[in-house]
Image (spheres, rainbow, N blue to C red):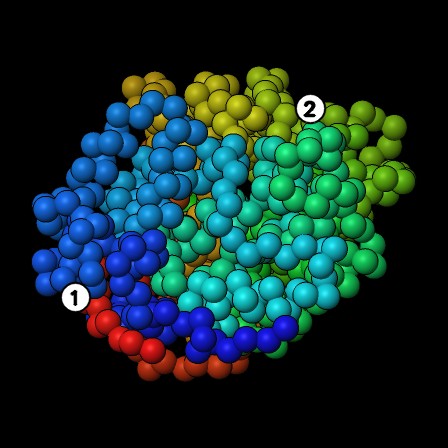
């Protein structure tokens, strides 16, 4: 099977990063209204309607983008349930992307929980490129077709988000339905970092599902088969990755919601050979480190002096452990074994120890010597009593796991405990921020995995940072794409974390009542600073293929803004 890009190309919208001032297209009439990136709806001018044969298809009134956005907000505000709001926004996304992004950017703080965590995990979208294991012989053709059908030349794709839907946070294995997460991540790349939406590709690898409800459902749209594992799985993913490397030379490859075993294995395999990033491992680790940095900049502590307890040793927990360990090695010059001993990891069986026979490969390096621990209990409270942690991080999805006794015990041994209940959605958090302030007598630094209202304690109001990866991955991706980074290295990720920390209200004001992380409404400017830091570090390390003289100007020029372009109708 073969085809030419020219035969499928219908417009020039995604030919360059940033905003095109004039777009050439061969589409007119209903066809241009059906193209979400080209559709202006009632904003088509009288002249455009005549030129593009739209006069009979649109009502009399001509609106500006701002007027359309105001009408959209009025409709949106009438909706009550988050899932209905999400479906409404998905519909707008599929009709008019410029209007969609204009509304999202103007209302980012309130709409982020609707289009992303926690609501997105409850909604199944249909947009995306589907690569199916039973049709693996056609994988290369289908991936290229997926780009070309969307009018994107493979060499112009900037970001690919891929999932196998194996471990979607909070809801587990969703089979082919996980494509919604790939789409949502790319929405944030555009909304928060200005990646041109015509230059991205959401991909789902359908390798089956172990979700019995889906396997038993005759209406399930994916491959009704148990998940492929072992060498067969590895070969399928490798075929996909090689296709990306061969045909998508600019693409930053983002892995999303892979199961704990595969996530680590794939990152280790492909990080040394291409610009790739696992958000569940590196993104979660980076935003956590940024939050810890902010807390330590207020308290005056040093990362090397902290004792870390991580409760929940899945993909996210191990990602945080790895990033903390790597930070201590890279920034503080610690030996690997010394850095590992700063971290205590617990999972369902309690503290991880080397005599356990059910440890995942990535858990083994943090398992403690059973002789060191002795015969004592390995539960969270016992670990806190013995270790006296200064940092307690929850990735367990066990609601209420950080009990009053655990927190009060921790607070007895450090002046300002850093406690991050990061599990999401909200119903799965390990503790409420209000309880943490009460149980520590206001001494705590808090960041959470889902949004919480400010906490009032002892006459003061404390903002609660949402430790959301959306502050990290868009800017890292932008920095890697702008610099055409060969790889996405740990020092580049730490540069991103520090940039986020420097943008936080608490760091800038030196006031712990303010949030440890920037406000969502400032996300695009934060992404600019993250991208600049990442690109500078890439250049410093010799990882950049592009060497812009003015990095900030290049980053800002690269960013797409939601505004309508002018069209030139061409005939093939």
| Gap in angstroms between the C-alphas marked 2 and 1 | 71 Å
The picture places residue 519, in percent across and down from the top left corner, at 32, 43
Numbered circle sitting on residue 374: none
Picture residue at 23% right of the left edge, 36% below the top: 73
Quadrant of residue 533 within the rendered picture: bottom left
User: Which is nearer the eye, 509 or 277?
Assistant: 277
Task: Provide residue 437's location: percent of width, then percent of height.
Answer: 45, 23
Residue reaching furthest to the front: 56
Is 464 situated left or right of 129 in this image?
A: left
Residue at 55 percent of width and 56 percent of height: 129
Q: Secondary structure at mark 2?
A: helix
Residue ID for mark 1 = 51
Q: Quadrant of the N terminus?
A: bottom right
User: Which quadrant holds the C terminus?
Assistant: bottom left
The relative height of residue 433 versus residue 140 in the rendered view (above or below) is: above
Q: Is residue 84 above or below residue 527?
A: above
Looking at this view, is 82 or 302 the one in front?
82
Q: Is residue 238 visible?
A: no
Residue identified by numbered label 2 = 381
State which quadrant residue 82 falls in.
Answer: top left
Q: Earlier in the sequence, mark 2 or mark 1?
A: 1
How packed mark 1 is, by other alpha carbons closer than 10 Å (few <14, some 14-19, many 20 or more), is some
Instruction: Confirm or deny contact between disc 2 and disc 1 (CB under 8 A).
Output: no
The quadrant holding residue 282 is bottom right
**Residue depth check, mark 2 versus mark 1: number of the one nearer the observer:** 1
Q: Residue at x 86, y 43 (%)?
A: 354
Above/below status of 408 relative to 132: above
Q: Is residue 28 visible?
A: yes
Q: Position of residue 382 (x, y in %)?
A: 73, 25
- The image position of residue 338, as x and y in percent, is 72, 54
For label 1, the SS is helix
């Amino acid at each position: 099977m073969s085809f030419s890009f020219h035969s499928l190309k219908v417009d020039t919208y995604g030919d360059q990063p940033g905003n095109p001032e004039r777009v050439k297209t061969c589409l007119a009439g209903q066809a241009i209204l059906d193209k979400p990136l080209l559709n202006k709806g009632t904003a088509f001018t009288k002249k455009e309607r005549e030129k593009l044969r739209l006069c009979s298809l649109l009502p009399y009134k001509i609106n500006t983008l701002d007027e359309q956005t105001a009408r959209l907000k009025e409709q949106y505000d009438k909706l009550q349930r988050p899932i209905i709001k999400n479906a409404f926004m998905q519909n707008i996304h599929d009709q008019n992307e410029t209007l969609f992004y204009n509304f999202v950017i103007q209302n980012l703080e309130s709409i982020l929980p609707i289009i992303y965590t926690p609501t997105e995990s409850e909604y199944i979208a249909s947009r995306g490129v589907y690569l199916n294991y039973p049709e693996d012989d056609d994988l290369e053709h289908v991936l290229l077709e997926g780009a070309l059908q969307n009018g994107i030349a493979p060499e112009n794709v900037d970001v690919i988000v891929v999932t196998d839907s194996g471990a979607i946070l909070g809801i587990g294995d969703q089979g082919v339905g996980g494509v919604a997460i790939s789409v949502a991540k790319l929405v944030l790349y555009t909304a928060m970092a200005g990646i041109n939406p015509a230059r991205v590709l959401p991909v789902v690898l359908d390798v089956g599902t172990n979700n019995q409800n889906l396997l038993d459902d005759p209406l399930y749209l994916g491959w009704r088969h148990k998940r492929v594992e072992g060498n067969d799985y590895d070969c399928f993913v490798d075929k996909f990755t090689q296709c990306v490397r061969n045909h998508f030379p600019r693409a930053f490859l983002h892995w999303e919601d892979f199961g704990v075993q595969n996530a680590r294995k794939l990152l280790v395999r492909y990080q040394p050979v291409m610009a790739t990033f696992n958000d569940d491992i590196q993104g979660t680790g980076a935003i956590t480190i940024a939050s810890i940095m902010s807390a330590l900049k207020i308290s005056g502590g040093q990362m090397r002096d902290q004792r870390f307890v991580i409760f929940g040793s899945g993909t996210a927990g191990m990602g945080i452990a790895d990033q903390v360990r790597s930070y201590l090695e890279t920034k503080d010059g610690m030996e690997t074994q010394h850095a590992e001993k700063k971290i205590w990891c617990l999972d369902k069986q309690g503290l991880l120890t080397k005599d356990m026979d059910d440890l995942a490969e990535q858990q083994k390096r943090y398992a403690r010597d059973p002789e060191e621990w002795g015969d004592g209990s390995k539960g969270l409270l016992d670990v806190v009593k013995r270790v006296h942690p200064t940092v307690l991080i929850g990735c367990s999805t066990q609601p209420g796991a950080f009990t009053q006794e655990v927190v009060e015990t921790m607070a007895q041994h450090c002046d300002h405990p850093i406690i991050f209940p990061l599990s999401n959605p909200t119903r799965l958090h390990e503790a409420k921020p209000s309880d943490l302030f009460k149980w520590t007598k206001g001494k705590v630094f808090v960041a959470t995995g889902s949004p919480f209202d400010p906490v009032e304690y002892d006459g003061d109001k404390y903002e609660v940072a949402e430790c959301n990866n959306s502050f990290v991955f868009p800017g890292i991706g932008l920095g890697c794409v702008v610099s055409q980074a060969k790889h996405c290295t740990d020092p580049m990720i730490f540069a991103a974390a520090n940039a986020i920390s420097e943008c936080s209200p608490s760091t800038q004001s030196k006031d712990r009542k303010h949030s440890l992380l920037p406000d969502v409404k400032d996300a695009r400017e934060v992404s600019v600073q993250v991208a600049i830091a990442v690109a500078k570090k890439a250049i410093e390390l010799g990882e950049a293929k592009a060497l812009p003289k003015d990095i900030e100007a290049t980053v800002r020029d690269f960013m797409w803004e939601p505004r309508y372009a002018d069209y030139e109708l061409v005939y093939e």
